[in-house]
Amino acid sequence: MELVNHVVPWAAHDTRLLLSCLVGLVAIIVFISALKLSPFLSILIGTFIAGLGAGLPLDAVAGAFSKGAGGLLGDAGMIIALGAMLGALMADTGAADRIVTVLLTFAKGSALPWMMALVAMIVGLPLFFEVGLVMMVPIIFVMARRANTPILRVAIPALAGMTTLHALVPPHPGPLIAVSALHADLGMTMGLGLLIAIPAVILAGPLYGMWLAPRLHVEAPQQLGELFTKRDDDVAPPPFAAALLVILLPVVLMLGRTLAKIALTPETPLFDALNFLGEPIIALALTVVVAIVVLGWSRGLPRAGVGETLRRALPPIAGLLLTIGAGGGLKQALVTAGIATTIGKVAVGTHMPLILLAWLIAVALRQATGSATVATTTTAGIVAPLVMHLPPVQGSLIALAIGAGSVFFCHVNDAGFWMVREYFGLKLKETLWVWSVLQTIVSVVGLAMTLLLWQVFV
C-alpha cells in the first residue's frame, strides 16, 4: 500500500489553534451538562472562547458566527420547518398511522428494527440526511407508540440507515465531492459504497439499537411527541396510496435531480426542470402543498383546521433551530481561524498507508469543524495529488474512506447532533450514546471494509 512521507512546517500558531478549539469544545460541554445553560447560549460562548483563543479579533468571531449560523439556517432551518409542518399534517390526518399499520403487517417484534433500517435506506438513498430525518421522524414516533416499543429501538436503525447512505453513497454531497476531487469513477464508487453500507447499517442500526435500547430508557419529548402522534379520531385515515404518495414525493423529486445530473445534458429544459424540482427546499415545499391538498382539503377537512395544524408545527422546533444555527456559527469560526489548514499540516507530515491517512485526516477535520463537507473537501484536496495515477477502484475506495472518516464521533459542533438531541428529547450524555457512538460504528466499519476491499482488489 502506498506510503506518504511529507514534512510541512509547523508553527506555534497551529498548536495554539488546536488547543483553543479543544478548550472551546470542552467549555460547551461543561456549560450544557454542569451549568445547565441552553445549548444555544453555550455554543455561542464556546465559539468566542475558541475564536479569541485562536487569535481572531472579536468582530471577526462575531462575523464568522453570524455567517455560519445564517448559512445553516437558510438551508437546514427551512428544511426542518417544512418537515415539521409535513409531520404534523401526516399525524393529524392519520397518514402516519396508515403507513405504520401497513409496515406492521410485514414486520413485528424482533423484525421491526430491521424493517426500519430498510425503509430508512430506501428513503435516504436520494435524500440529504436532514431531509430524510424530518421525513422519518413522524413514522418513528408513531411506530414506537403503535408497537409499544422503546423509541430508540425504532429510531437507531432509521438513523443508521440514513446517515450511512449519506456518508458512503453518491450522490450525497460528501462522497460526491470526494469522487469529483479524486477523479474517481462515480458508478464504481456508488456500487462499492452500497456494498460497504450494508454491514455498517446492520451493526450501527438494528444490532446496536437492540443492545442500547434496554440500557438507555428514553421517553419521547412531550411537545414533539404530541405534534407527531396526535390525530383527530373523528377523521378517517387516508388511503395508503395517498399517504405513500406524500412520503415518497420528495424521494422521487430528488432522485430525478440526481439522475438528471448523471444522464442529461445541462441547461436543457428537462434538466433544468428536474434540477429545480429536486432542490431539497423546493421538493419539501411542494410535498407540503401536496399533503395539504391530498391529505386535507380533498378529504373535506376544514381549511381553518389544516392551517392551525401548520401553525402548531412551528413553535416546538424554535429551540432546535437556534441550536443548529449556533452549531453552524461555531463551525464557521473554527474554519475562519484556519483549523483545516492546521490539521492538513499535521496529517501530511505522517508516515502511514494512504487509505488510513485519508480516513484520519477526515476524522480530525470533522472533529474540529463539525462539517462533513469541510472534512471531505479538505481531505480530498490534500490526498488528491497522491492518487492521480492509482487504478479507478483504489480511487473509489479512498473516496469512501474519506466519507467514512467524515462521520466519526460527531459531537457538539455537528448540526445532526442537535437535531437528534432535540427531536428525541435526549440529554447530552444520551445523545453521545445514541448519535456519536452510532456514527463512530459507521465510520469504523467503513474504514474496515475499505481496507478489506483494498486487499481484495489490489
Image (tube, rainbow, N blue to C red):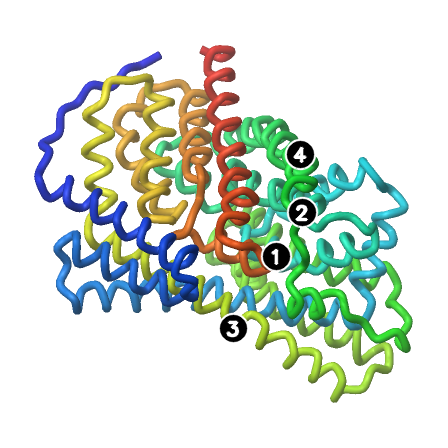
Left or right, residue 30 beside residue 324 = left
Type of amino acid at the residue the image marks with label 4: Trp
Q: How far apart are marks 4 and 1 (CA)?
A: 18 Å
Query: Helix, strand, or loop for circle 4?
Result: helix
- Using the image, tell me which numbered label, if any, was put on residue 211: 4
Classify 10 Å Cα crowding around label 4: few (below 14), some (14-19), many (20 and above). few
Q: Where is residue 283 in the image (x, y as percent from the top left)?
A: 60, 63
Classify 10 Å Cα crowding around label 3: few (below 14), some (14-19), many (20 and above). few
Q: Distance between the residues labelled 3 and 2?
A: 23 Å
Query: Helix, strand, or loop for circle 1?
Result: loop
Q: Are marks 4 and 2 in contact (CB under 8 Å)?
A: no
Which residue is at 50% across, 48% downward?
A: 429
Type of amino acid at the residue the image marks with label 1: Phe
Q: In front: 265, or 351? A: 351
- Using the image, tell me which numbered label, if any, was put on residue 424: 1
- Using the image, tell me which numbered label, if any, was put on residue 288: none
* 1 or 3: tag closer to the N-terminus: 3
Q: Name the residue under label 2.
A: 152
Above or below — where is 445 with respect to 429?
A: above
Q: Do the residues labelled 1 and 3 touch (CB within 8 Å)?
A: no
Q: Are marks 3 and 2 in contact (CB under 8 Å)?
A: no
